[in-house]
Image: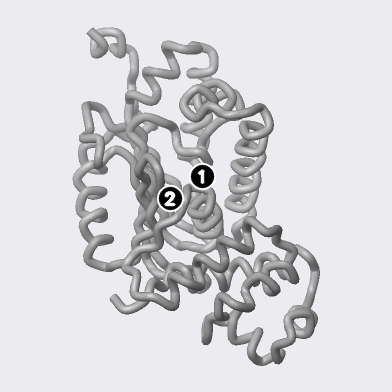
Amino acid sequence: MAKTESGAWFIRMMLKTGRDRVGKTQEQIARLCHVSTDTYRAYEAGRSSPHASIMENLAKACGYDAELAEYMVKAADARAEEWEALEADQRFNALYIALAERFYGEIFKFDALMIPGILQLQGYHYLVVRLAEPGSDEWVDNGWDFKEMRIADIEARTDRPMFQFLIGEAALIQLRMMDEELYQEQLAHLRRWAKKPGVLIRILRGPVLAQRSNFEIYHVGKSKLAGPDIAYSEIVDSSWLIDDPKRIASYDGLRKILWKQAIRIEVYNDDDWRYRLA
């Protein structure tokens, strides 16, 4: 493919949501950045994408700090070059995923070892995630604040997006071994989520190859504000937003296989978990 469209969509939605948050009009942002109002409107509408050279001023006018401005510049560079995927650190792609959760119509998340972030209870974040991703108290607190923001944004949606969550049973067994009470609370929380309109949750028993154990897929669905279809994947030192249709199709194929093998959370029975550990 010639250009990565995920970067262009990220810029467009960062501008729109940032401007809304700081309470500025399109005319005000355009004036602050010394571009015409029509030019800025084209940025938000997706008819054109701003050059990296003016991205810092646009980000500042929309209330973003230097770190977020740098990410927007990176997205602009990806748009201008022939990339088939947008590689960045996990902080950048977490921002993209947060936007995708607000605007995409069909969302699939799979994790063989952890409960997906927006399904986590606070106790799970501070117990399990803290051990899996050690950091300072401030870092852990900021991580939970970010998850709460994402959850609130999802719950504020007035449309009916479709969510599929696939969770490896290993994540539940591990939690039960660490804290039985928290395990019961988290399991009840998952079942409450599964009662929400458009939400499906399944538990996958059995081993999964490491390279297939964590990925997400975002489809436009019926959303009018979504970006291109994307797949999201992580490695140790980086993460990828993939908008190549052929590669997304391969992820979709794996999703269908794993989904058929999994058990609906409503009927999941963990009474024999000790025997499966043996």
Tag 2: amino acid: Phe
**Residue at 41% of width from left, 73% of height from top?**
5
Residue 196 - label: 1
Instruction: Tell me: residue 29, above or below residue 274.
Output: below
Residue 200's quadrant in the figure? top left
Picture coordinates of residue 3, whole percent (x, y): 37, 76
Secondary element under disc 1, as helix, strand or loop, is loop
Q: State left or right for residue 162 relative to residue 28.
A: left
Picture coordinates of residue 275, whole percent (x, y): 24, 8
Which residue is at the far front?
53
Q: CA distance from mark 2 to mark 1?
A: 10 Å
Of labels 2 and 1, earlier in sequence is: 2
Q: Are marks 2 and 1 in contact (CB under 8 Å)?
A: yes
Residue 141's quadrant in the figure? top right
Picture coordinates of residue 169, whole percent (x, y): 33, 26
- Check disc 2 and report the residue beneath it: 163
